[in-house]
Amino acid sequence: MSNWIVYLLRCADNTLYCGITNDIERRLKQHNNGSGAKYTRARKPVSLETCVDVASQSDALKLEILVKKQKRNNKIEFLESQK
């Protein structure tokens, strides 16, 4: 079973984008070449702010929801506390 990753990107307009993947390098390239999420297409380039490994896709989806519920100022700290 492959590990899943919950990640936060910093967009060019200084906003944060949260997502999940099982290949962070591939996904970062997709975001930067315009084939990633609709949100990041108009906000490139993006850079990886932080990421956390989780055991399953289900766990990744649950953690992504929790991150998105956090206030903007707390998202990075919250995600890093899950390591």
Image: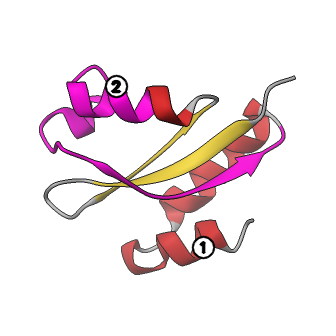
The relative height of residue 78 versus residue 57 in the rendered view (above or below) is below
For residue 23, what is the image quadrant? Answer: top right
Q: Which residue is mark 2?
A: 30
- Locate residue 4, reporting x and y percent: 71, 36
Residue segment shown in magenta:
27-55
Task: Tell me which residue sits at (60%, 47%) in the image.
Answer: 6
| Left or right of 27, for residue 31 | left
Task: Tell me which residue sits at (56%, 60%) in the image.
Answer: 67
Q: Which residue is mark 1?
A: 78
Dot 2 falls on a residue whose secondary structure is helix
Depth check: 32 or 43 in front?
32
The relative height of residue 46 versus residue 39 in the rendered view (above or below) is below
Give the label, 1 or 2, closer to the camera. 2
Quadrant (top left/top right/bottom left/bottom right) for the N terminus: top right
* Amino acid on which disc 1 is placed: Phe
Quadrant (top left/top right/bottom left/bottom right) for the C terminus: bottom right
- Locate residue 41, reporting x and y percent: 18, 32
For residue 28, what is the image quadrant? Answer: top left
Question: Mark 1 and 2 residues: CB-CB less than 8 Å, in contact?
Answer: no
* Amino acid on which disc 2 is placed: Gln
Q: Residues within 10 Å of mark 1 (few under 14, many from 20)?
A: some
Query: If you read the primary sequence from the N terminus, does the residue marked by circle 1 or circle 2 appear first?
Result: 2
